[in-house]
Image (spheres, rainbow, N blue to C red):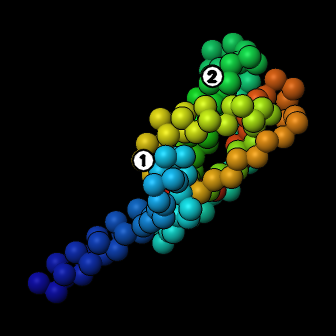
Amino acid sequence: MMIRTLFAAAAVAAVAQAAPAKEFLKGDRQQQSGYSLAVVTEGGKTIWLAGQTATAGDDGKSLAADFDGQVRQLFRNLDRTLQRVGGKLSDMVQMTVFITDVRNGRRFTELRREILGDNFPGSALVTVTALQSPDAKIEIQGYAVVGSK
């Protein structure tokens, strides 16, 4: 009986360690805008994601004039990066978004809500005059908390 209890306790501890607890703090305004005031985590490992842009799709076609296409491809790229370390897009807890045209801010919010679902990372949206790639309309850098291996 004692051994079974120890195994059960170890299994519970392993599950808790593999899936870090996340609490999303937000109100109605934040829910509508697709970000959280804060994301509180326990456990897991922290991943710092470098700023990324997406000026070409998976098929190699240019996305230079396609803001929606750049956003969608960028989130796919971030997800792939996180998968390489055992995570997924929903593990993001903070992002800084840089856009080159303030008029795209509302559209980005709509796309982020569509792509991320209901629980959003903390976020800042910054308008800049240009990004490193002249064709880039958006860049995202962020942080994720991924369950321990």
The residue tagged 2 is: 69
Q: Position of residue 70 (x, y in %)?
A: 67, 26
Dot 1 lies on which element?
loop
Q: In the visual, does 43 lie left or right of 63?
A: left
* Residue that sits furthest to the bottom in the current view: 2
Q: In the rendered image, is residue 138 in sight?
A: yes
68 to 10, vertically: above or below: above
Q: Position of residue 96 (x, y in %)?
A: 70, 50
Q: Residue shown at 16%/86% (left/top)?
A: 2
Amino acid type at mark 1 = Asp
Separation (CA) of disc 2 from disc 1: 21 Å
The label nearer to you, 2 versus 1, is 1
Q: Residue shown at 24%/81% (left/top)?
A: 6
N-terminal label among 2 and 1? 2
The residue tagged 1 is: 118
Q: In the visual, does 7 lie left or right of 49?
A: left
Give the crowd class for mark 1: few <14, some 14-19, many >=20 residues within 10 Å.
Answer: some
Q: In the rendered image, is residue 120 in sight?
A: no
* Residue that sits furthest to the front in the current view: 29
What is the quadrant of the N terminus in the image? bottom left
Q: Residue shown at 49%/46% (left/top)?
A: 32
Amino acid type at mark 2 = Gly
